[in-house]
Image (cartoon, helix red, strand yellow):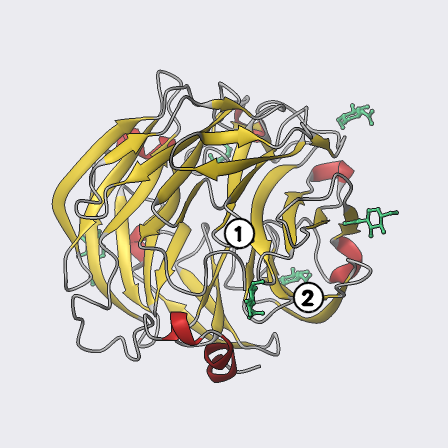
């Protein structure tokens, strides 16, 4: 399905989508970008204003998340915290409607903020952080359609917990508790160790499915993609269908991005990734195509742009972004400033990408031309190991609630 037919199904959203990334206007850019500082002394969300030209401005703000951070340990470095990517995840910060959700990986809590529409640099916590019923929460999904949030616990006690969401009551547990995976993993997760950890959770296919990825590692090998059903009332199934990534073209897996219903590009720690197709009845995936390049290293993150109808695969270990088409073919490789070494969490609005890089620099890129629009310095190099997640307000139309 081409983007045009997606737009035909969603006429109300179509009006909000920028028809071109050339000539920024007040209507074609988000108003703020947010990321999480996973800090053992107390985590916080950093908000950065986005100007009407789409560029990040010097106006920033910081908000306590009411809990502490716990960082992934680097197995090959004496279990010291990793140099980047403290949760080894995608969607540690998630935005939908006027809400921002994020995790306290050391307190095992999920937290919700209300975003002031007139001044998105003002966040207000709604209620208190709520328990995630597991350990080392790393990623959050939100459905605008069902007003539900779900969190992926990625540590030793792993699985998914869900909540209903309201302005008034904040996050209310759905009564199911932890939908346990029982995977052999550690708290916190380890990089390069023997076991994997949770990496990504998102609603999919117009919020009729909830899909999470749990990366594999080392000798335990296989990564998983788990699918939950969401009924028309927005209730999320207690059981799930497990798919192992290895037979689907992958090795360890990492995160995923969706375009048309049922199509998901699943990135892989070891190489670019695979485009998969979901059978809505069996909740099993089949492989459409797998892409790979010797230029890629730690190709863990992926976003889909509604403007270009391409999946993008972002590498932490090299300054390259893979462009993958709707058939799963690696079409092109964008090279960015090699001083930045690599990039991690990325949020896209239209065809503009806001990406955390290996340095304390946020790279704003036009994915259509492959050109950098801005290299934005924030904070200090010493602080960079704490950063993860990247989300925009408003979130890019079509990406909320799961295409
Ligand atoms: C993990 O440790 C190894 C060995 O010291 C180092 O080369 C690598 O850059 C580290 N990775 C991260 C993400 O910290
Ligand atoms: C979990 O993984 C660790 C590390 O590989 C291993 O020592 C342990 O036996 C595993 N436990 C189970 C129950 O498989
Ligand atoms: C998504 O679900 C809503 C409500 O159930 C429905 O009105 C809409 O047509 C669906 N959109 C698509 C693209 O299927
Ligand atoms: C949950 O279990 C029911 C009954 O066995 C099954 O029909 C359904 O497909 C399962 N759902 C998922 C998401 O695995
Ligand atoms: C990807 O490419 C690299 C280097 O070109 C190769 O070592 C690796 O085996 C490939 N992986 C897959 C899954 O094709
Ligand atoms: C590459 O990034 C570095 C670090 O932000 C910056 O100093 C340099 O000017 C950039 N180079 C180009 C060609 O933009």
Left or right of residue 279, residue 167 in this image: left
Residue count near mark 2 (Cα–Cα under 10 Å), binned few <14, some 14–19, many ≥20? many
Left or right of residue 124, residue 267 in this image: right
Residue count near mark 1 (Cα–Cα under 10 Å), binned few <14, some 14–19, many ≥20? many
The first of marks 2 and 1 along the sequence is: 2
Left or right of residue 51, residue 294 in this image: right
* Residue 331 vertical placement versus 378 (above, below): below
Q: Position of residue 334 (x, y in %)?
A: 39, 70
* Residue 22 vertical placement versus 13 (above, below): below
Which mark lies nearer to you, 2 or 1? 2
* Residue 280 vertical placement versus 344 (above, below): below
Does the residue tagged 2 have its C-beta within 8 Å of any atom of ligand 5?
Answer: no
Residue shown at 40% from the left, 33% from the top? 112
- Say what secondary structure mark 2 lies in: strand
Who is closer to the viewer here, 328 or 151? Answer: 151
Left or right of residue 360, residue 401 in this image: right
- Say what secondary structure mark 1 lies in: loop
Q: Can residue 89 be seen at all in this image of the molecule?
A: no
Residue 300: image tag: 1
Q: On the rendered image, what quadrant is the C terminus found in? A: bottom right
Disc 2 to disc 1, how far (Cα)? 16 Å
Who is closer to the viewer here, 50 or 335? Answer: 50
Q: Position of residue 267 (x, y in %)?
A: 58, 57
Q: Position of residue 400 (x, y in %)?
A: 46, 57
Number of disc labels:
2
Q: Quadrant of residue 214?
A: top right
Residue shown at 47% from the left, 55% from the top? 315
Q: Position of residue 286 (x, y in %)?
A: 77, 66
* Residue 342 vertical placement versus 195 (above, below): below
Residue 276: image tag: 2
């Amino acid at each position: 399905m081409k983007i045009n037919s997606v737009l035909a199904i969603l006429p109300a959203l179509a009006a909000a989508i920028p028809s071109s990334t050339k000539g920024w206007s007040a209507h074609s850019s988000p108003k703020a970008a947010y990321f999480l500082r996973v800090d053992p002394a107390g985590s916080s969300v950093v908000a950065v204003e986005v100007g009407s030209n789409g560029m990040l401005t010097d106006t920033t703000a910081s908000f306590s998340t009411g809990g502490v951070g716990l960082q992934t340990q680097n197995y090959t470095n004496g279990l010291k915290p990793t140099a980047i990517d403290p949760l080894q995840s995608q969607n540690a910060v998630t935005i939908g409607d006027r809400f921002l959700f994020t995790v306290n990986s050391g307190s095992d809590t999920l937290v919700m903020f209300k975003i002031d529409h007139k001044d998105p640099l003002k966040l207000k916590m709604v209620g208190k952080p709520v328990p995630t019923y597991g350990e080392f929460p790393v990623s959050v999904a939100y459905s605008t359609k069902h007003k539900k949030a779900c969190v992926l616990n990625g540590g030793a006690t792993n699985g998914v917990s869900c909540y209903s969401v309201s302005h008034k009551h904040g996050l209310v547990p759905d009564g199911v508790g932890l939908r346990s995976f029982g995977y052999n993993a550690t708290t916190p997760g380890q990089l390069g160790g023997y076991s994997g950890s949770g990496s990504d959770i998102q609603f999919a296919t117009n919020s009729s499915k909830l899909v999470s990825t749990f990366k594999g590692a080392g000798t335990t090998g296989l990564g998983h993609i788990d699918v939950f059903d969401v009924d028309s009332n927005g209730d999320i199934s207690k059981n799930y269908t497990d798919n192992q990534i290895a037979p689907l073209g992958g090795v360890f897996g990492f995160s995923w991005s969706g375009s048309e219903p049922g199509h998901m590009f699943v990135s892989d720690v070891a190489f670019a990734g695979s485009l998969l197709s979901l059978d809505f009845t069996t909740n099993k995936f089949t492989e459409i195509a797998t892409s790979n390049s010797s230029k890629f290293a730690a190709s863990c993150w992926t976003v889909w742009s509604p403007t270009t109808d391409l999946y993008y695969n972002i590498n932490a270990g090299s300054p390259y972004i893979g462009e993958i088409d709707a058939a799963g073919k690696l079409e092109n490789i964008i090279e960015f400033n090699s001083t930045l070494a690599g990039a991690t969490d990325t949020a896209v609005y239209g065809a503009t990408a806001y990406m955390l890089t290996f340095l304390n620099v946020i790279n704003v890129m036009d994915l259509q031309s492959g050109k950098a629009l801005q290299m934005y310095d924030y904070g200090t190099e010493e602080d960079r190991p704490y950063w993860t997640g990247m989300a925009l307000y408003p979130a890019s139309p079509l990406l909320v609630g799961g295409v």
